[in-house]
Every structure is written in structure tokens, then in C-alpha cells.
Image (cartoon, rainbow, N blue to C red):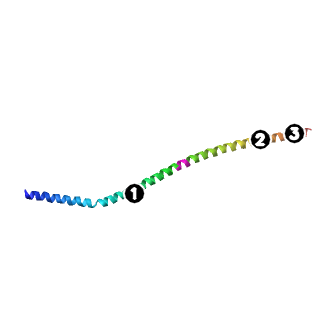
Amino acid sequence: RASQLAAQLAAAEHEVWGLQAQVARLPEYEAQLDTVAQQLGAAEQQCQQLMEQVSELERLRQSLAAAHQAADLHQQRTEALAAELHHTKQQLEQLQAEQAAQAQQQ
């Protein structure tokens, strides 16, 4: 009976030493946790910055699309004005030809 109690006591002492060793390492674990928490905070900040950049890129994409639409509309107007100018020039040339013919007849 005494030897059994001695063995249990030795086992309990061994377990206590193991627990004390783990307790002694708690500051190291806490330091590791602090480091991980800082890294996580930095990663969250980078993620927030990336999200802001994505939003800015989307605004720029929309602005670019609007600029393309405006340029297309401007191109259409320019082409319409060029066609109108060409037509007016033809009418002027025809009128000048008619006036020249009338002048020759007189």
C-alpha cells in the first residue's frame, strides 16, 4: 500500500512539474499570441487598403467608360457635321455652277 501511494505521489509530482513547465512557458505563448495579433491587425489594415483601392479602381473604370461614351458621341457628332459640311459644299458647288451657266446665257 505504501509503495502504491509512493508511486502515485511520484506520478502526481511528475505531472505537477510538467504543468509548472507549461506555466513557465505561458509568457512565451502570450508573446507569440501578441505577435500573431499584431500580424492579423496589419493584415486587416492591408485588406482595408486593398478594398479602398478596389473601390477607387471601380470608380476609375466607370469614369473611363463614361469618357469612352462621350468620345463615341463626339465622334458621331463630328461625322454628322462632316457629312453635313460635305452636303453643303456640294450644294454650293451646284449653285455656283448654275449661276455660271445663267451668266453665260445672258
* Quadrant of the image occupied by residue 40: bottom left
Q: Give the main secondary structure of the magenta stretch.
A: helix
Residue annotated with mark 3 = 101
Q: Residue furthest right?
A: 106
Is 58 a magenta residue?
yes
Badge 3 amino acid:
Ala
Q: Which residue is mark 1?
A: 38
Callout 1 amino acid: Gln
> Between disc 1 and disc 2, whose residue precedes?
1
| Residue range (magenta) | 56-60
> How far separated are the C-alphas under marks 1 and 2?
74 Å
What residue is rendered at 40% in x and 57% in y?
A: 39
Q: CA distance from mark 3 to mark 2?
A: 20 Å
Where is residue 18 shown, x and y percent of the image? 22, 59
> Residue drawn 14% across and 60% down?
10
- The label shown at residue 88 is 2
First in sequence: mark 3 or mark 2? 2
Cα distance between the residues tagged 3 and 1? 93 Å
